[in-house]
């Protein structure tokens, strides 16, 4: 950064005493108006449109308040009379009268970016340029004439900072003019906890990070993914799961085949056959022997099997893959053939030529359809009595080729090595208070579709499935408990069930409880009521269907309640959309406090592109198109179906030209105004919990003050009456929070 002129070097004025009280209204305050430019400021809880007028109220300084271990944002708005070039910003330390200071390293400056909304979310939205992304300030920039140019400044108050008043300045200059904006900060005499008091779940998908950051190696992905985790931690939000990057692995014994399903009907002989279903047009589904089968060079072999297909004449493929001494494929010796299937059992065979001595083993692979590179074809096939024989002696060398495995010989071992790497980072070091425990084998689904659990090749409801899943869940529960992680997990395996899904969900929940009594079961519920909530420890209801009476009644029985936002609610409701009032996401946490909710959820934080709309290899540009488009749910490929501006998208990739800019971005995400305001709401929630604790622990001599303070937790209707009736005035919100902070200080010092 180019050095600032002497006229704009940061100065400190330590003589002034800063008032703790904020103005009742905070639409903005004018700091300076002149022939070349104007400067004004407002809180972070505001969206400054480019054409908003200058505020009428005048102020000599930015005035903010924060606790220790809190982030507090504000906005400085520059309005040049003519285009300004070389605009530079420098925020200096904030100093206390004792000499203590909050270093400049704790003050971050970002520019407020705009995205163009061409299709409003609904009739309550509006087209135009909306402020949302917050790219970090990285050097001189140009500012357009006659337009608001907001800067987003965030002050972090360290835990060791003394309480009291601090002062400093933010210096702004261009090639033609300069200004210094005084900043007054009051630090409350209490500290926000390191671990959030409210739990959360915001989806973070590593594959999108990889695509938008142009990453190629595992090392690069892990590095950037960790920067995202750091960002989540700084915003007091937990990612839905870290198992996306650090999964649990399982290894089965006594089950010689992997892929497909072992079924009791139809069979060719014995009790079982192997069923393989390929329902995906973008992958080649297969089953194969779990371990390579040893071969001897120069010996002739024969592979034989019985098969039937879903449709008469359906193509299916059998593949014998040759491996060398290191287990590497020798592609030139592939033996692969497509057969015409039948709706009746039919025997077929392959007879490879004798292998050379360099080939030490083979893997038998079975495909229910024609195998191509894209996995284009779909279909179902059954296989039975698969044999691999040598030299014509008739002995089957292929373990389990008849699929008649002994249940008593079946077992599973859970491999925690990768999981532990992720857990130690996410839970021990970063301190996230919740995570979705993605357990293999449990069914999945939503109101739209569902899939029964499958584990080790056995379907939910079979004795083999129950035996294997019970052992797996037991191992997972024991491992979590031994490492001090039990209680932070939740099993979120079914989404928004309809009444038709309740029997299936109930069966799955009971099965989890039967096999692992301490694991936390979780469900999102868009049809609130007790009909299914009794089989989960956490119920998460969509925001506009939260029933405070039901929450209170079931909370008294030990249930935990969360709420979630997504493509709904729309209209006048508190929501997550870009084209909505700034206060919305902050108000979500006030509602959580008023209704006794313990958590918040949004399905994604980095949903940048819809594979249902955009072709493979083509990425939506969230910097240019803020709309979130539907993915899945029966929408035909290529259909334009709208979810809302910014749904599932709180972060921006640093790459502003995805798909065109191939530079590797080894940096973290770009924040949004909505992401910052979500943190503001979470920090408000911490104030509520600190006041609750202070009231509960107040000494007898402060009983009257405690009773008065408790009334602050019962918000007046003027602040929040319902999800559709709430204040849009940030000043009113901050005034109430100031009163809460004063009450916390008074009660905690009364001891």
Image (cartoon, rainbow, N blue to C red):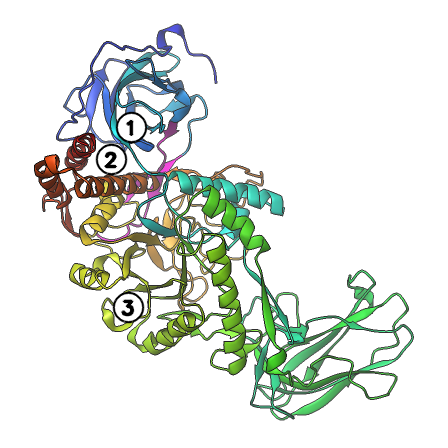
In the current view of this chain or complex, which residue is farthest to the front?
Answer: 700
Specify the quadrant of the image occupied by residue 55. top left
How busy is the neighbourhood of tag 3: few (under 14 within 10 Å), some, or many (20 plus)? Answer: many
Asked if the magenta segment contains residue 221, the reply would be no
Which disc number belongs to residue 75? 1
Front one among 98 and 248: 98
Asked if the magenta segment contains residue 133, the reply would be yes
Residue 182 vs residue 209: left or right? left
Which disc number belongs to residue 46? 2
Cβ atoms under marks 2 and 1 closer than 8 Å: yes
Percent position (x, y) of residue 292? 75, 70
Residue 265 vs residue 338: left or right? left
Q: SS for tag 3?
A: helix
Residue depicted at x 17% and y 59%: 548
How busy is the neighbourhood of tag 2: few (under 14 within 10 Å), some, or many (20 plus)? Answer: many
The boundaries of the magenta stretch are 108-134
Residue 733 vs residue 118: left or right? left
- How far apart are labels 2 and 1 at the CA level? 9 Å
Residue depicted at x 31% and y 11%: 12
Cβ atoms under marks 3 and 1 closer than 8 Å: no
Residue under circle 3? Answer: 533
Percent position (x, y) of residue 447? 35, 70
């Amino acid at each position: 950064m180019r050095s600032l002129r002497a006229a704009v070097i940061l100065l400190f004025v330590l003589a002034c005493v800063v008032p703790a009280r904020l103005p009742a209204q905070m639409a903005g305050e004018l700091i300076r108006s002149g022939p070349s430019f104007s400067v004004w400021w407002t809180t972070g809880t505001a969206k400054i449109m480019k054409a908003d007028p200058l505020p009428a109220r005048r102020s000599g300084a930015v005035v903010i308040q924060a606790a220790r271990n809190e982030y507090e944002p504000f906005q400085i708005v520059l309005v040049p009379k003519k285009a300004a070039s070389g605009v530079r910003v420098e925020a200096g330390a904030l100093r206390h009268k004792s000499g203590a200071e909050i270093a400049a390293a704790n003050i971050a400056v970002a520019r407020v970016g705009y995205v163009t909304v061409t299709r409003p979310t609904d009739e309550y939205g509006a087209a135009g340029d909306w402020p949302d992304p917050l790219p970090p300030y990285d050097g001189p920039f140009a500012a357009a004439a006659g337009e608001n140019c907001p800067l987003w400044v965030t002050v972090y108050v360290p835990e060791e900072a003394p309480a009291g008043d601090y002062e400093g300045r933010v210096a702004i200059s261009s090639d033609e003019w300069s200004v210094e904006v005084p900043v007054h900060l009051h630090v409350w005499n209490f500290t926000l906890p390191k671990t959030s008091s409210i739990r959360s779940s915001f989806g973070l998908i590593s594959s999108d990070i990889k695509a938008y950051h142009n990453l190629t190696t595992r090392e690069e992905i892990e590095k950037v993914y960790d920067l995202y985790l750091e960002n989540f931690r700084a915003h007091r939000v937990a990612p839905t799961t870290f198992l996306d990057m650090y999964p649990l692995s399982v290894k089965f014994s006594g089950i010689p085949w992997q892929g497909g399903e072992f079924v009791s009907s139809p069979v060719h002989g014995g009790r079982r056959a192997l069923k393989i279903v390929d329902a995906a047009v973008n992958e080649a589904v297969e089953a194969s022997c779990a371990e390579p089968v040893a071969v001897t060079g120069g010996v002739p072999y024969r592979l034989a099997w019985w098969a039937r297909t879903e449709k008469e004449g359906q193509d299916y493929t059998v593949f014998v893959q040759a491996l060398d001494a290191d287990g590497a494929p020798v592609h030139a010796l592939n033996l692969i053939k497509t057969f015409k299937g039948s709706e009746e059992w039919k025997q077929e065979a392959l007879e490879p030529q004798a292998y050379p001595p360099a080939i030490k083993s083979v893997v038998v692979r079975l495909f229910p359809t024609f195998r191509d590179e894209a996995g284009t074809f779909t279909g179902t096939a059954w296989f039975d009595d698969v044999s691999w024989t040598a030299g014509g002696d008739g002995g089957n060398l292929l373990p389990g080729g008849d699929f008649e495995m002994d249940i008593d010989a079946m077992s599973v071992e859970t491999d925690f090595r990768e999981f532990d790497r992720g857990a130690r980072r996410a839970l021990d070091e970063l301190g996230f208070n919740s995570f979705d425990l993605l357990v293999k084998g449990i069914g999945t689904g939503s109101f739209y579709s569902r899939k029964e659990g499958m584990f080790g090749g056995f379907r939910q409801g079979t004795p083999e499935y129950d035996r294997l899943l019970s052992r797996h869940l037991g191992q997972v529960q024991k491992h979590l408990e031994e490492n001090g992680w039990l209680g932070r997990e939740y099993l979120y395996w079914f989404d928004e069930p309809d009444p038709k899904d309740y029997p299936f969900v109930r069966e799955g929940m009971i099965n989890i409880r039967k096999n692992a009594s301490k694991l936390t079961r979780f469900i999102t519920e868009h049809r609130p009521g007790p009909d299914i909530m009794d089989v989960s420890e956490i119920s998460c209801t969509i925001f506009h269907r939260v029933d405070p009476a039901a929450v209170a009644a079931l909370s008294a029985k030990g249930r935990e309640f969360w709420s979630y936002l997504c493509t709904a609610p729309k209209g006048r409701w508190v929501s997550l959309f870009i084209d909505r009032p700034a206060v919305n996401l902050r108000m979500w946490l006030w509602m959580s406090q008023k209704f006794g909710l313990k958590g918040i959820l949004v399905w994604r934080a980095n949903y940048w592109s819809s594979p249902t709309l955009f072709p493979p290899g083509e990425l939506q540009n969230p910097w240019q198109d803020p709309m979130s488009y539907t993915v899945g749910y029966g929408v035909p490929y290529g259909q334009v179906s709208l979810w809302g501006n910014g749904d599932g998208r709180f972060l921006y990739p640093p790459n502003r030209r995805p798909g065109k800019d191939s530079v590797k971005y080894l940096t973290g995400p770009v924040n949004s105004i909505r992401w910052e305001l979500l943190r503001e709401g979470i920090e408000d929630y911490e104030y509520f919990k600190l006041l609750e604790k202070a009231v509960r622990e107040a000494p007898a001599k402060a009983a009257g003050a405690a009773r008065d303070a408790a009334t602050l937790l019962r918000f007046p209707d003027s602040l929040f009456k319902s999800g559709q009736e709430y204040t849009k005035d940030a000043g009113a919100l901050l005034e109430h929070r100031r009163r809460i902070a004063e009450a916390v200080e008074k009660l905690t010092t009364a001891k």
